[in-house]
């Protein structure tokens, strides 16, 4: 925090007040960040740069932060670049006058498309000097690429990329040595990496959030000709973290922060209907006794853990005092009876096109004096004749988009388990007991359409065991056990919290939670599987290094029909060679036959975890003292595709390492990994 309390030098001197921020200035900061792994230094580079933006061109703060976090808009806006490696290669070739074959050859040798772009650019003779790129120009250009649709969209995407690449590095056309300084501050490199979805700077979104708070408080002090105190800096960081967790939209927060100051941000930016929050998540446990140990005398409550899809429902009545947020893309808010509503997934994706049947009935569950709310629910497939919950697989057979109510075959019932906002007020800080009371008071359950999650407040081991058995009989996955009273029982957006524990029926005898892994490669099938892939290479995600670390090969748990479906989807994502951010074994015999873009996440179960020199998972977590083995899954089994998770939401290397360590300690202290308590 040294530079916060001193008058630091501008990191980029050649930009004048009021001018659009030069993209080269951001790239210079990126290149400095790329040369270090120290979080504090990274943060200092970030906050210095953001301070300069705030002082000279505050209007550009929003696109600057977005380009730093490798996003174009908040998740709920549904804006995806949707660009594969082949389109990028085509654009690099065409914008630099090099053939696709040469680009592919370079890609084979260098392995990093960003650097291929740098190399291509620096060998091109410059006929005339294009205008230098600006941050807002790059953001607009990328937005244009992301939003083209219709006939010839692919071609126009390539044109958009070419336009950016042709203007990249306008002021530094000289030859760049790509082996030095990781290719330096090349604009082409970072544009290509943005398009690939991985800047690979070790720049976590959380780091940017803290840097932004630091930059803002330092800027405010600078205007008053003072320096911020450590207390102020800490307060600013905590305010911004809280605000962002309740309202994860820089589009809303940044203009408010610039206008009202960071210390007043909470008054202006609160949880509001229309902006989905990242949901609170639970920690896995392996035994009821573990749950009892954790809560240790504090009151908790158990609820059925329904096996469906998380749904966050936002609603505002037309005669309410507030409006469903202006920032919501207009198509996302649907008129429902007396109000307007939207449904969001666990990922903050907008789901109203998937659940028009839910929206159509929504109003009938809302009591007359309930004027606005944000509900946390699970939407579950429902057997209309038997009047009971159906397995998750049934829900998956529903169409994902453009569902027509008349054509819905699999009905869903919405099980509400939490209420986060009611009648104009965020209630996340109230205790769960109070939130639950408000939930039960504000809605009318309707059989087979809308219900409150079944709950039980007994605190004894055998009561919980009985309730767990009942949940399994009711086709649920097990139980969620939650802190019921006191501040710890508040709703913690985006957190995997120890105040929510999950007990899944499958954990009890096995290794614990299933894993959600990214498909990186595949092996051609043999025998009757020759037309499809027969086995796959899977990886977990390391958010610190931004790499996918291999963890197993898998060929079990697939039906022939599923293999065909997976083949059709995966073929579209084949790439020539592994991405530079794949950590995998390079030994010849361990290479898959084909590699894929990191796009699909699969849920996988395993018998146990072991160390193996063939895989890389958790290597950086110190599980192997010698440092040359990673963790691998033994007898992995495919469960389902997790459409609701993005690759960087896969199980992390740290979680895999934790699972491995837990298993190790169980094995050491109690013999076999089976659970003693059952
Ligand atoms: P999982 O594969 O277990 O769903 P996850 O990472 O998606 O893992 P977890 O935090 O592990 O999420 O488990 C909580 C999930 O369980 C929620 O995201 C929600 O979709 C679902 N769920 C079902 N019933 C409840 C309930 N009563 N309370 C909270 N979450 C519930």
Image (tube, grey):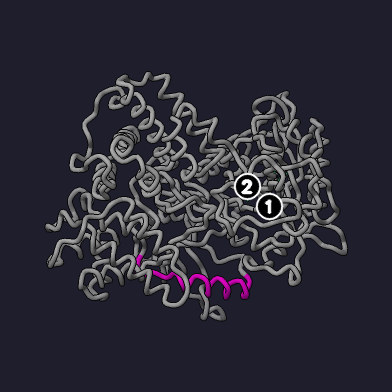
Q: Residue at x 40, y 51 (%)?
A: 70
Q: Residue at x 29, y 24 (%)?
A: 2
Total residue callouts:
2
- Name the disc covering residue 340, or none: 1
Look at the numbered disc 1 and give the secondary structure of its residue: strand
Whether label 2 touches label 1, CB < 8 Å? yes
**Horizontal and vertical percent for residue 117?**
25, 62
Gap in angstroms between the C-alphas marked 2 and 1:
7 Å
- Name the disc covering residue 324, or none: 2
Disc with the residue nearer the chain's start (2 vs 1): 2
Q: Is residue 547 above or below residue 489?
A: below
Q: Is residue 506 left or right of residue 162?
A: right
Q: Is residue 2 left or right of residue 664?
A: left
**What's drawn in magenta, residue-wise?**
559-577
* Quadrant of residue 402 within the rendered picture: bottom right
Q: Is residue 306 left or right of residue 331?
A: right
Q: Quadrant of the N terminus?
A: top left
Q: Is residue 190 left or right of residue 603?
A: left
**Horizontal and vertical percent for residue 16?**
22, 41
- For the question of whether residue 603 can be seen, the reply is no
The magenta stretch spans residue 206: no
Q: Residue at x 72, y 37 (%)?
A: 288
- For the question of whether residue 98 can be seen, the reply is yes
Depth check: 67 or 302 in front?
67
- Magenta residues: mostly which secondary structure? helix
Q: Is residue 485 above or below residue 181?
A: above
* Quadrant of residue 85 within the rendered picture: bottom left
Depth check: 380 or 288 in front?
380
**Horizontal and vertical percent for residue 459?**
79, 30
């Amino acid at each position: 925090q040294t530079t916060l309390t001193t008058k630091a030098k501008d990191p980029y001197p050649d930009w004048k007040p009021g001018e659009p921020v030069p993209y080269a200035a951001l790239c210079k900061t990126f290149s400095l960040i790329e040369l270090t792994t120290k979080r504090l230094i990274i943060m200092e580079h970030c906050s210095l740069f953001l301070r300069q933006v705030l002082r000279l061109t505050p209007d550009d703060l929003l696109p600057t932060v977005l380009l730093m976090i490798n996003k174009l808009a908040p998740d709920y806006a549904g804006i995806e670049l949707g660009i594969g490696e082949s389109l990028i290669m085509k654009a690099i070739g065409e914008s630099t006058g090099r053939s696709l074959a040469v680009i592919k050859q370079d890609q084979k040798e260098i392995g990093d498309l960003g650097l291929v772009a740098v190399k291509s650019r620096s060998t091109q003779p410059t006929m005339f000097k294009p205008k230098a790129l600006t941050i807002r120009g790059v953001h607009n250009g990328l937005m244009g690429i992301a939003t083209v649709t219709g006939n010839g969209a692919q071609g126009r995407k390539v044109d958009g990329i070419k336009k950016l690449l042709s203007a990249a590095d306008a002021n530094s056309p000289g030859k760049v040595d790509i082996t030095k300084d990781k290719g330096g501050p090349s604009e082409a490199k970072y544009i290509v990496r943005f398009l690939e979805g991985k800047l690979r700077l070790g720049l976590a979104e959380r780091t940017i959030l803290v840097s932004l708070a630091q930059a803002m408080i330092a800027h405010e002090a600078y205007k008053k000709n003072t320096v911020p105190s450590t207390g102020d800096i800490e307060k600013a960081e905590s305010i911004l973290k809280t605000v962002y967790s309740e309202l994860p939209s820089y589009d809303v927060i940044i203009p408010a922060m610039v206008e009202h100051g960071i210390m007043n941000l909470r008054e202006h930016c609160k949880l509001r209907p229309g902006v989905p929050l990242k949901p609170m998540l639970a920690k896995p446990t392996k035994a009821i006794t573990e749950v009892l140990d954790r809560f240790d005398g504090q009151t908790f409550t158990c609820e059925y853990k329904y096996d469906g899809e998380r749904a966050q429902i936002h609603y505002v009545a037309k005669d309410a005092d507030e409006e469903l947020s202006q920032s919501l893309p207009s198509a996302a808010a649907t008129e429902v009876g007396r109000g307007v509503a939207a449904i969001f997934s666990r990922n903050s994706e907008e789901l109203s096109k998937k659940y028009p049947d839910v929206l159509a009935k929504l109003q009938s569950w809302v009591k007359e004096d309930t004027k606005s709310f944000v509900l946390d629910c699970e939407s579950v497939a429902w057997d209309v004749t038997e009047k009971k919950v159906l397995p998750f697989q049934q829900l998956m057979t529903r169409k994902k988009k453009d569902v027509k109510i008349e054509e819905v075959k699999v009905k869903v019932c919405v099980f509400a388990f939490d209420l986060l906002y009611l009648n104009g007020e965020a209630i996340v800080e109230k205790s769960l007991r109070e939130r639950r009371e408000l939930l039960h008071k504000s809605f009318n359950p309707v059989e087979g359409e809308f219900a409150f999650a079944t709950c039980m407040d007994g605190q004894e081991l055998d009561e919980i065991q009985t309730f767990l058995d009942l949940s399994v009989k009711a086709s649920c996955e097990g139980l969620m056990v939650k802190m019921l009273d006191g501040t710890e029982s508040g709703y913690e957006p985006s957190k995997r919290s120890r105040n929510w524990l999950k007990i899944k029926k499958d954990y009890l005898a096995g290794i614990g939670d299933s894993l959600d892994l990214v498909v990186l490669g595949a092996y051609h099938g043999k025998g009757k599987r020759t037309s499809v892939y027969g086995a796959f290479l899977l990886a977990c995600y390391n958010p610190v290094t931004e790499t996918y670390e291999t963890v197993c090969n898998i060929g079990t748990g697939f039906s022939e029909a599923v293999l065909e479906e997976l083949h059709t989807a995966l073929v579209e994502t084949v790439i020539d060679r592994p991405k530079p951010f794949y950590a995998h074994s390079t030994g010849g015999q361990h290479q898959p036959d084909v590699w894929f873009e990191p796009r699909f996440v699969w849920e996988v179960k395993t018998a146990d975890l072991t160390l193996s020199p063939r895989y890389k998972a958790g290597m950086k977590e110190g599980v192997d003292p010698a440092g040359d083995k990673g963790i691998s899954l033994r007898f992995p089994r495919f469960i389902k595709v997790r459409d609701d998770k993005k690759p960087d939401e896969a199980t992390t290397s740290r979680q895999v390492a934790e699972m491995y360590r837990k298993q190790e300690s169980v094995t050491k202290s109690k013999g076999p990994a089976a659970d003693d308590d059952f």
